Amino acid sequence: MKKATDILAEQNGDIVLVLLDLSLQDMDVRQLLLKTVERYPNLKFVICSGSLPDELDFDQQPSVKGILNKPFELKDLRALVECTIQGD
């Protein structure tokens, strides 16, 4: 199975939005976010979190366009993705 970072590299900038779950195993999500933003500055992120305090850590990161608290409804995900892709 390919890693998301490998897929991003293969797509060479064609991906515009990443849905990033804070509960990834064996990975520091904040470091992943910072390194990915450094390499792909135009990439946008929507963060999924099951714990509200995590939101505060992403307030200063302009690449993070939204935060969805789990559990979320598909309609909420769809609305945020559409707004993020069309916005800015």
Image (cartoon, helix red, strand yellow):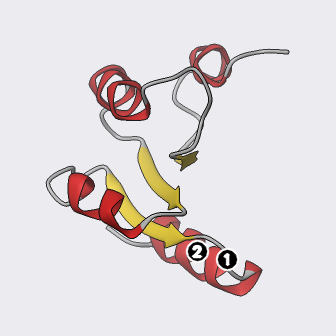
Residue 43 placement, left or right of 82: left
* Element assignment for label 1: helix
Q: Cα distance, mark 1 to mark 2?
A: 6 Å
The front one of 57 and 17 is 57
Identify the residue under disc 1.
78
Residue 29 coordinates in the image, percent (x, y)? 43, 33
Q: Is residue 41 above or below residue 56?
A: above
Residue drawn at x 23%, y 52% is: 57
Determine whether label 1 and label 2 are within 8 Å by CB: yes
* Element assignment for label 2: helix
Residue 5 placement, left or right of 75: left
Residue drawn at x 29%, y 29% is: 34
Q: Is residue 39 above or below residue 82?
A: above
Mark 2 packing: few (<14 Cα in 10 Å), some, or many (20+)? Answer: few
Q: Using the image, tell me which numbered label, if any, was put on residue 56.
A: none
Image quarter for residue 39? top left
Q: Is residue 70 above or below residue 3?
A: below
What amino acid type should be assigned to the residue bearing mark 2? Glu
Disc 1 or disc 2, which is closer to the eye? 1
Residue 79 coordinates in the image, percent (x, y)? 60, 82
Image quarter for residue 5? top right
Mark 1 packing: few (<14 Cα in 10 Å), some, or many (20+)? Answer: few
Residue 6 placement, left or right of 54: right
Identify the residue under disc 2.
82
Image quarter (top left, top right, bottom left or bottom right) of the N terminus = top right
**Count of picture labels:** 2
What amino acid type should be assigned to the residue bearing mark 1? Arg
The front one of 88 and 47 is 47
Residue 16 coordinates in the image, percent (x, y)? 52, 46
Image quarter (top left, top right, bottom left or bottom right) of the C terminus = bottom left
Residue 35 coordinates in the image, percent (x, y)? 33, 21
| Outermost left residue | 60
